Image (cartoon, rainbow, N blue to C red):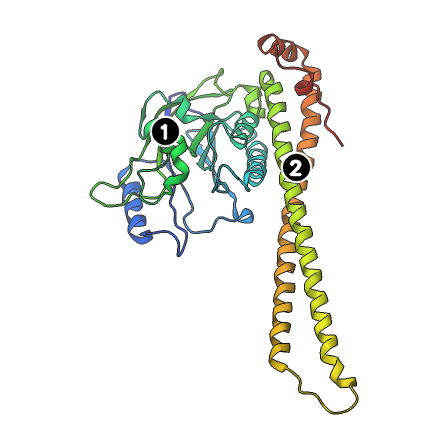
Amino acid sequence: MTTSAPIRLRVFSLNCWGIRYLSKNCIERFVLIGDLLNQEQLDMALLQEAQHGDWFGGKAVGKVLLNISGLTVHVFVTHLHAEYCREKDLYLPHRVVQAWELQQFIRHTSAGADVVILGGDLNMHPDDLGTRLLRNYTGLLDSFSEAAKFDGCEEGFTYISENPFTHTDGLVPFGGGVRIDYILFKGSGEVDVSCESLSTTKGPVPGQPFPYSDHEALTAEFLFTPTKKGNGCSEREFGYISDKLPELINTVNEARTEVKVGLHCSERMRHTAARTGIMGLVLLVLELAIAAVPLFALGAEQPFPKASFYLLGALCFAVLLSTLMLYIFYSIEVKALQGTEDQMRLALSSLHERIKESPKVLSSDHLRNPQYNKDSVHLKPDS
């Protein structure tokens, strides 16, 4: 039976920076993180990077389904691919693909949920393409923007230059910090969800020379108020809101373009690996042919340079093996990018159909945004 009394939920999220052999002070920091979790009156702890590397195929999303006083609460946790270099972001298409797959998973698995919460290290700034794609499609709200009270680093930064574990060079253009860790949420037609407070850790652990991680931790306190007119109306249960359809179309178009760029780069790298492998195969065949010459030579026997032969053969085999692995890797990458691009094309077709069925949405958007033209609204997805 669903309660009518307000319910409070405290959610904690932290990228623990537990990469084996690379992270510093892991044992000491993990003990301190455990102490922090024991001290805080938390209902949910969402931990990322407890122990793994940062690879395109190694990311995932975890989900916990809770029943809190009759309310169905879906909680998700994830960690997307790192940026590394913002000026030459080679992994932007990968994060866009991950954001696309994440929003699909959330929407498809949380149908009928009273409350949806997502926490994790998204490795994206608040206005980045992947963040907009995720939020616009799912209707999730940012706890930093929605919090009634905030206590933490300036502007909610979760990756700061004062942290001794961070690479400060990339943070200088952003005022010494960026916000890339989030706790997102939304309610439903049955429950109004508000973020009462949000806080972050602030650098070193008290009494210690180092912080809990290279990221700052987030703690959000939510208030669930059962109601028939919650901030997650029936449209938000489906995901996006009708009034936001034109904006969503623009975002998906932008995301699709970025995925196409990544697809082109991956195809080029796959072709390069194939050409290099063919060259290695030709060299190996040529070496075998040279080795066979003494067998058919007439006259006195000539000394055979075994050392050079084995060395060259090992080199050719290494080239063939490495290029084969690269070809397989880029083929998997191409398949993932191509699959996402196809899904986006179909999604755009569906969104255009929905806009045609909602002419009032389109006309009202034109009134609010005169510059919103045919190229953005009526763009027909190519085949």
Q: Out of 157 and 113, give the one closest to the viewer.
A: 157
Sequence-wise, the earlier of marks 2 and 1 is 1
Residue 363 left/right relative to 129: right
Numbered-mark total: 2
At label 1, the amino acid type is Gly
Residue 34 left/right relative to 78: left
Res 9 seen here: no
**Would you name the residue on which mark 1 appears?**
156
Residue at x 29%, y 35% (from the top left corner): 202
**SS for dot 2:** helix
Q: Out of 173 and 67, give the one closest to the viewer.
A: 173
Residue 191 left/right relative to 14: right
Relative image position of residue 184 (x, y in whole percent) = 45, 29
Q: Closer to the observer: label 2 or label 1?
A: 2
At label 2, the amino acid type is Lys
Residue 135, placed above or below residue 360: below
Res 226 seen here: yes
- Screen quadrant of the N terminus: top left
Relative image position of residue 328 (x, y in whole percent) = 65, 55
Q: Out of 116 and 331, give the one closest to the viewer.
A: 331
Q: Out of 136 and 176, give the one closest to the viewer.
A: 176
Asked if the residue under mark 1 is in contact with the one under mark 2, i.e. CB atoms within 8 Å, the reply is no
